[in-house]
């Protein structure tokens, strides 16, 4: 992964007609050599042995979700009927019921629509609490046929990776921070800063998934 300054230097120093060459050190472009990575960023979640839950107080936020108003209202008791049905569908899928997610996806604004982000959050919770693994994750969308008929290609990619335990770094930082109270606030702020409503919808999904997996109504 190149830092921004490195990327800018590379772009500024190339003429545009250089042919990349694979060398022992990495890839050579003109007078530059992009070396083999020294560090790797693993985007697959590792479920903790003792997962720490997201406290209810963190849901008392004013950030807007895409479909259900402020986060505090969307996560309130009782849940909106549509979210109760969404959560019930997710529970059924975790229990092995064949589920066609095309009925739910693509709803709401954004490049990754609101319901899609909420499902990503629920998938994050399922992996975090050990309710999904490699085998079950691989089958999660098996009955959904072509998801691109109902939502964006970007969202389909995110969701299919999420089902297999791969998430964007702000989501991973968020779940890692749950076990470190000093980092929790910053991690949640970073998550909520994603997109226009994507962060709030994702956090809402994680909360719904957590409540479900903890057996709360």
Image: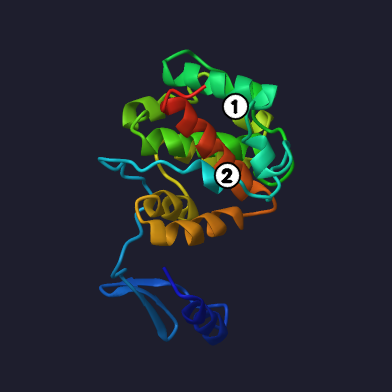
The mark found on residue 212 in the picture is none
- What residue is disc 1 on? 146
- Residue at left 65%, top 42%? 72
Residue 134 at x, y percent in the picture = 33, 32
> Of marks 2 and 1, which one's residue comes earlier in the chain?
2
| 38 in relation to 157, above or below | below
| 137 in relation to 197, above or below | above
Let me know if residue 113 appears in the view: no
Quadrant housing residue 201: top right
- Residue at left 40%, top 29%? 137
Residue 51 at x, y percent in the picture = 33, 41
| Secondary structure of the residue carrying numbered label 1 | loop
Is residue 192 toward the left or the right of residue 171 in the image?
Answer: right
Counting other residues with Cα less than 10 Å from the Cα at mark 2, is it few (<14), some (14-19), or many (20 or more)?
A: many
Let me know if residue 75 appears in the view: yes
- What residue is disc 2 on? 59
Is residue 204 toward the left or the right of residue 26 in the image?
Answer: right
């Amino acid at each position: 992964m190149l830092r921004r300054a490195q990327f800018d230097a590379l772009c500024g120093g190339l003429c545009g007609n250089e042919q990349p060459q694979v060398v022992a050190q990495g890839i050579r472009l003109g007078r530059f050599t992009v070396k083999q990575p020294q560090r790797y960023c693993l985007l697959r979640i590792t479920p903790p042995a003792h997962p720490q839950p997201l406290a209810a107080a963190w849901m008392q936020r004013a950030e807007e979700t895409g479909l259900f108003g402020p986060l505090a209202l969307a996560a309130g008791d009782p849940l909106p009927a549509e979210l109760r049905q969404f959560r019930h569908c997710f529970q059924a899928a975790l229990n092995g019921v064949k589920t066609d997610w095309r009925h739910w996806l693509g709803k709401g604004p954004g490049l990754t629509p609101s319901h899609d982000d909420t499902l990503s959050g629920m998938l994050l919770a399922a992996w975090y609490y050990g309710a999904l693994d490699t085998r079950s994750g691989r089958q999660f969308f098996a009955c959904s046929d072509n998801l691109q008929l109902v939502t964006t290609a970007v969202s389909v990619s995110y969701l299919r990776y999420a089902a297999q335990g791969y998430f964007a770094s702000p989501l991973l930082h968020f779940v890692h921070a749950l076990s470190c109270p000093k980092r929790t606030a910053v991690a949640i702020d970073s998550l909520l800063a994603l997109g226009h409503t994507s962060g709030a919808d994702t956090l809402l999904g994680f909360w719904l998934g957590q409540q479900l997996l903890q057996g709360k109504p």
